[in-house]
Image (tube, coloured by chain):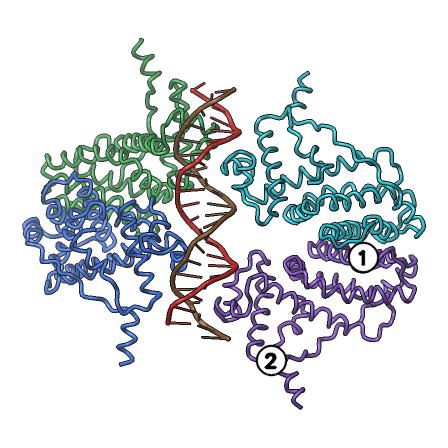
Chain colours: A blue, B green, C purple, D cyan, E red, F brown
Amino acid sequence: MPEALAESVWRPRRGLLKRERTRVLLVQAAIRVFGARGYADATIQEIAAVAGMTTGTVYNHFKTKEEVARGVAMLLAETLCRRITDSQQGVAEGAQRMAIGIQRYIWLAEQSPQWALMLMEVSAAAPDLLAEIAGYVLADLRLGVKQKAFRVPSEAAAMDMINGSVQQAMRTVARGSAPAKHGREVATCLLRGLGMEWAAAKQVASRALPAFPPMQAAEGPAAKKARRAA
Amino acid sequence: MPEALAESVWRPRRGLLKRERTRVLLVQAAIRVFGARGYADATIQEIAAVAGMTTGTVYNHFKTKEEVARGVAMLLAETLCRRITDSQQGVAEGAQRMAIGIQRYIWLAEQSPQWALMLMEVSAAAPDLLAEIAGYVLADLRLGVKQKAFRVPSEAAAMDMINGSVQQAMRTVARGSAPAKHGREVATCLLRGLGMEWAAAKQVASRALPAFPPMQAAEGPAAKKARRAA
Amino acid sequence: MPEALAESVWRPRRGLLKRERTRVLLVQAAIRVFGARGYADATIQEIAAVAGMTTGTVYNHFKTKEEVARGVAMLLAETLCRRITDSQQGVAEGAQRMAIGIQRYIWLAEQSPQWALMLMEVSAAAPDLLAEIAGYVLADLRLGVKQKAFRVPSEAAAMDMINGSVQQAMRTVARGSAPAKHGREVATCLLRGLGMEWAAAKQVASRALPAFPPMQAAEGPAAKKARRAA
Amino acid sequence: MPEALAESVWRPRRGLLKRERTRVLLVQAAIRVFGARGYADATIQEIAAVAGMTTGTVYNHFKTKEEVARGVAMLLAETLCRRITDSQQGVAEGAQRMAIGIQRYIWLAEQSPQWALMLMEVSAAAPDLLAEIAGYVLADLRLGVKQKAFRVPSEAAAMDMINGSVQQAMRTVARGSAPAKHGREVATCLLRGLGMEWAAAKQVASRALPAFPPMQAAEGPAAKKARRAA
DNA sequence: CATGAATGAGCCTTCATTCAT
DNA sequence: GATGAATGAAGGCTCATTCAT
């Protein structure tokens, strides 16, 4: 797990109902185990053990291993999207937002190759993850188009290009076979592919990435309930 | 299996030593089973049965299940590369060769979604497949660069973009959620990403795909031997 | 559940103390679930859910799953015996009472094969059911003997014959492999086995079955209490 | 297991192909385990262990636990039918053959209550057993009818009566709650139920049971093959 | 080389039962 | 009395792999 995300993912969730707290603990354990063993080789027993519970408890919350993957996917998606969105605060250009997102994912793969591979394995098992992320990417794409920075033959084609390229780049980086600055170069290619001119693409992709500050606590339903009651 | 490939893959291999013919039969059976069940759910016993042999025989030719996947990967790679290369006969422009390759893969995914998904699963288990294909892609990329049609920040970035995008597009198509002309639009994006101007990219991607004629028989070692002897 | 019994079994029990009403609701739910899944495949959790309660509640009323089966057995036995006895009102001949009982059970199996199989499964898990029923059968047997209609080598042998034959006939009927009039023919055989002459057996078994009127409400302890208090 | 059957069931099968020999060993082990634990509580692991093999081997021969029960049923059916048929050698009267069969089964339940209960449990899980036995019973029934000893309203009714009664009697005997001579008395009732006169029924049921000699070896396919080849 | 029976480690999954709230 | 989350012991079953024939 990239250090920069650890806190956001592991942070104990207060203010959740008991059932939900257990669920989150299980998902956190699953992230650890998926990361260590890979999705295919991870076992429910180990997830339970890591969470300090028993197998039965896992099945109280998830009907199948795949559903565990879905739980993991949702937590990761939520964390990633929120963290990256937070770091884009105040960036109004679609092109730059896109460049930030692209490079951030590749940067995360550099920080923790193992984690990146897990992320992609989980994505395969639980497409929800990509779907969630795609929402944010699409928003930036549309912003860029509206701002006349981008021009694409179709949103679908552009999305496939962006998502596929970033994933492939993450793999390359995780494998250790990427040159330095790979993130920036991939971003350059992609911005160009989205219709920008060479110089502009290069310029935008070269700007320093913004800081990546810890996520603010999300509210659980229990907390929401309490607030509503107030 | 896309009809257009079936003959090339299933054709009985004559002129091979017996050992190798058996091996090919097993690989062909494995392709069928992987396609039907997916790599993870395919069993050695079923592959053997489909090939009309027994488990033991499989292990006489492959040390592990993964090696079977490698065998499948090699056969598919060889078939794909040869067929696509053949169809590019006489195309001298790197840009157009690239456009043809990109669209052909996406077209194959349209022809047989199941097969496409299998292809990608096998790629994950046996990276040889992608490596082999990448060789051809890289050649076209370099050709395009040499011809000043392409301009890229780095070969690695361009390759990740191309490979990742095509895979993602194949997935989208296989899932059935791609718009019509997806192949052409993805190709347009990618050519643009490789440095071409909008109009040129669009124009090249819009040319009709060349025919996709059956592969000529490949020579087995036995035939080679015979020829050498002559 | 045979329609003819449904009302007697499902009828809400008024006038019961709350604790007992809950208990009955659970037993009724168990009958539904046992009928749908079979005893072995029924789960406490589903029984609770069907009753609109939780597992814990089930265990507040029954120490084990088997005890639930016992509860089911008692309710079914009570219902069956009472309904059949009611329908025998005014029949003074042991032989005819016996013929009615035999045919009624087989008729019930025709009405609802699934329910019949459940009945026998529950009997295996909770012999109380058969014991209860056997009491009524034995009474009719003795009546027939006293009236010189029956003549048997031993009560035990006769009881085994009657109970075993009826169960087997119910199974055959439930399986759908019994000819028409099976109930009547089995009854004829059994009456003959109990010592009657052919003609008499056949004649008695051929009489029309009496109507099968809904059961009158049974009193619960609360009602009893109230009555005692009066 | 009743001593009188043990030798017939456990005898090592020579002249069987290896696969079949293993299968028989597994079935024999299953009989032991079903007898000791009951069908529901028997585990595949224990069966394998008792047979000196591993669980995987069991599943090489039987797809499910129920199929193991079927294997047991077939072996028991074959053994029982052959042994009883052998002991009826030279008995030409259908009535007496029937009386012998009825009493023999009940006698076996006396010899080994546990085994009898197992037999009935297995019958429930694998109806093949009863079906096989029923064939022999039906033959005797028809013989008796042809000889004018029996008269029944329908074969189906008679069969249900015989099978059901014998099973119930076996249960009663196995439970230890049957009076002495229960077998004879049940047989008397049943012969009467099949249409005989009281005196005749009693007389036939009172004859001494014939000896119960060990079964002659059955030929396995390998032996058959060898013989054919000769 | 082919055969195919045997292996065996180990996973997923179920569910009766408990117990703190 | 009701709740329902948690338990945990087991068991069925799979399948890649081996090896004697």
Tell me the distance, in whole angstroms, between the alpha carbons under discs 1 and 2: 38 Å
Q: Counting other residues with Cα less than 10 Å from the Cα at mark 2, is it few (<14), some (14-19), or many (20 or more)?
A: some
**Residue D101, relative to residue C23: is it above or below?**
above
What is the number of the mark on residue A224? Answer: none
* Number of numbered discs: 2
What amino acid type should be assigned to the residue bearing mark 2? Leu
Residue at the (28%, 78%) spot, across then down: A228
Residue at the (11%, 40%) spot, across then down: A179
Element assignment for label 1: helix
Q: Is residue C146 left or right of residue A195?
A: right
Q: Which residue is mark 1?
A: C156
What amino acid type should be assigned to the residue bearing mark 1? Ala
Q: Is residue C38 left or right of residue C128?
A: left
Q: Nearer the viewer, residue D101 or B101?
A: D101
The chain that hosts pointer 1 is C
**Residue A205, relative to residue B143: is it above or below?**
below
Q: Which residue is mark 2?
A: C16
Mark nearer the N terminus (1 vs 2) = 2
Element assignment for label 2: loop
- Residue C166 x/y as whole percent: 76, 58
- Residue C40 x/y as whole percent: 58, 56
The chain that hosts pointer 2 is C
- Residue B99 x/y as whole percent: 21, 41
Residue at the (67%, 87%) spot, across then down: C227
Q: Is residue C225 left or right of residue B120?
A: right
The answer to whether residue C119 of the structure is visible from this angle is: yes
